[in-house]
Image (cartoon, grey):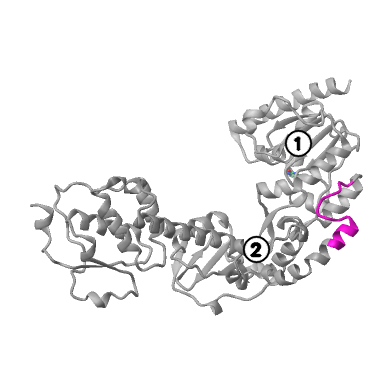
Amino acid sequence: MTALQHVKLGTYYVVHLPEPDDFDFWREQARALVQCAVPPDRVAWVEPGGSGDLFAHGERRAPAPPVDIRPVRANRRFLSLAKNAILHSDAERFALLYRLLWRLQTIPRIMEDKADPDLRRIEELDKNVRRDSHKMHAFVRFRLVESASVSEGPELGEHYVAWFEPEHHILRANAGFFMRRFSNMRWSILTPQGSLHWDTETMSEGPPAQRRDAPGGDSMEDLWRSYYASIFNPARLKVGAMLKEMPKKYWKNMPEAALIPELVAGAQKRESTMVEKGTLEFEERPETLEAIDKAIHACRKCPIGLLDSHAVMGEGPRDAAFMIVGEQPGDQEDQQGRPFVGPAGQLLDVHLEKVGIDRRVAYVTNTVKHFKYVQRGKRRLHQNPGAKEIDTCRWWIESERAIVQPKLVLAMGASAARGILGKTVSISKVRSTPIPLEDGSELWVTAHPSYLLRLDGRAREEQERLFDADLAAVKVRLEELTQ
Ligand code: URA
C-alpha cells in the first residue's frame, strides 16, 4: 500500500495537542502525517484552549502510516530548533514547523538557506524562547513564606515561592535549571500557565496561578535590596543597557528593582560623593592588615556578605614567608572569628605537625572572607562559593599578599587556587609543581583538608599520603627560599 492510498484523499486532519509544549506528541503526529503524504494545507494544529471547533469535521488524529514506509528526514539542527520553537506562544508554530518538515523531505538543503522565510521565522521563535528562558533564570525571585519551628523538623524547612510571567511556554522546560540551582531549597514557581513545586527530592506540577497567590515582601527582599544597592556603581551607569538587560515588565517581581529609579536619579550625586571621599569602588588598596580586617567586615560586594555571618580575617605573622590559603571560613571559624579552627583546621594541624611545619610561622587565610551557607533548621550547611564570588573576593587576598609578601603560597583546594590565579585549575594536574606568581613568589596547590574529611578507607589513606607529600615538598622549598 502506498502512503497516498493510506489516507482518504481530501481528508482534513485536526491534531489536538494535549499540552502547548508537547514536542514529542507533535513530532509523532508530524512524522505520521508526512509518511502518509498529508500536505501542510490539509492539517490544522490546535493547542489546549485553541480554536479547534472551527475544524470540527476533520479527522482528529494523524493516520497510522504503513509499516514499510521511508523514514522522515529531519536533521539535528531542525530538531533542536523545533524543540525550542514549539515553546513559543505563537499559535502558528506547529503549522510552521510542519510546513518546514514537509519541505525538508524534498529540499534537504533548506536548513542552510539563510533567506528561507520559514526557516527565518523558526529561528526567530527559537531566539525569543531562549531570551524568555534567560530572563526567567535571571529574574525569578523567591520569597520566604514559611519557617520551620524546631519542633516541625528539618523536612518542613522554609518554603520559597516565586511569581513569574513568562511570555512563552517555557516553565516545564526550565524546571531542571531551577532544580539544579536550588536543589536544597523547598520552592514553588507560580505562573499564569502552571506551577512547579520542588520539595528537595521530587518535582511536581500544579495548576495556573495568579499574582495574588504569591506572597509579598519578606526579609529576603531586604537582603536583595541592600545587595543591589551595594553593588550598584553609579560611575558605570548606562540606563539603556540596564533596561535592555532588565526590562521594566520584570521589575514588579524584583524587590531590588524598587530602588532603581531612586538610584538612577541619585547616581550623579552618589558618584561625586564617592570621588570626593575616595571610595569609588575598590580603587585604593588597603595598606595595612587592620584596614583589610575593617573593610572585609563592611564588604557587601556579593550576596555572601549579606548572610548572617562575620568576615574572618587571616592570622599569623605579617611578614610571614609562608601563606596558607583555604576556601572560606566554616561554621566554627565564623563563630570564633579565626581561620581553620574547625574540623578541617584540626586535620590540617595534624598533617602540618606530621611533616614538621610549625603552623605559627604561616599566615593562614581564606580566599573568600565570609561563610557561605544555607540554613537547615538549626544547622548552617556549607555551600561552595561560586566563581564570581571568589573573583570578587580576590581583591582581599591580593591585598593581604601585597602586605605580607610571602615567598611561598600554599592554596588548598580549587577555590583557593582560583583566588590566587584568577582562573580554575585542576588540582590533580597542578599539585606538586610550583607555579611562579607575578610578584616573584611561588604558588603550590594541594587538596583541601575538607576533601580528605569526606573520604574514608583506602581513598582517604591515599589522599592523606598525597597531602603529606605536598606539605613535605613545600617544607623543603620553603627552607630553600628562606635560607
Ligand atoms: N575551610 C576553609 O577553607 N577555611 C577555613 O578557615 C575553615 C575551613
Q: Is residue 307 visible?
A: no
Q: Is residue 282 visible?
A: yes
Which quarter of the frame holds ligand 1?
top right
Residue 38 quadrant: bottom left
Instruction: Mark 2: give few (<14), some (14-19) or many (20+) Cα within 10 Å.
Output: few
Question: Which residue has dot 1 on it?
Answer: 348
For residue 41, above or below residue 337: below
Q: Is residue 451 left or right of residue 288?
A: left
Q: Which residues are magenta?
A: 272-286
Residue 378 quadrant: bottom right
For residue 250, above or below residue 105: below
Relative image position of residue 192 (x, y in whole percent): 47, 73
Q: Amino acid at mark 1?
A: Leu
* Quadrant position of the C terminus in the picture: top right
Residue drawn 20% across and 65% down? 42
Residue drawn 88% across and 33% down? 320
Instruction: Mark 1: give few (<14), some (14-19) or many (20+) Cα within 10 Å.
Output: many
Mark sitting earlier along the chain (2/1)? 2
For residue 272, above or below residue 360: below
Q: Amino acid at mark 2?
A: Gly
Relative image position of residue 172 (x, y in whole percent): 44, 62
Residue 240's disc number: 2
Relative image position of residue 132 (x, y in whole percent): 50, 62
Q: Nearer the viewer, residue 195 or 236?
A: 236
Residue 283 highlighted magenta (yes or no): yes
Marks 2, 1: nearer the viewer: 2
Residue 402's disc number: none
Disc 1 on helix, strand or loop?
A: helix
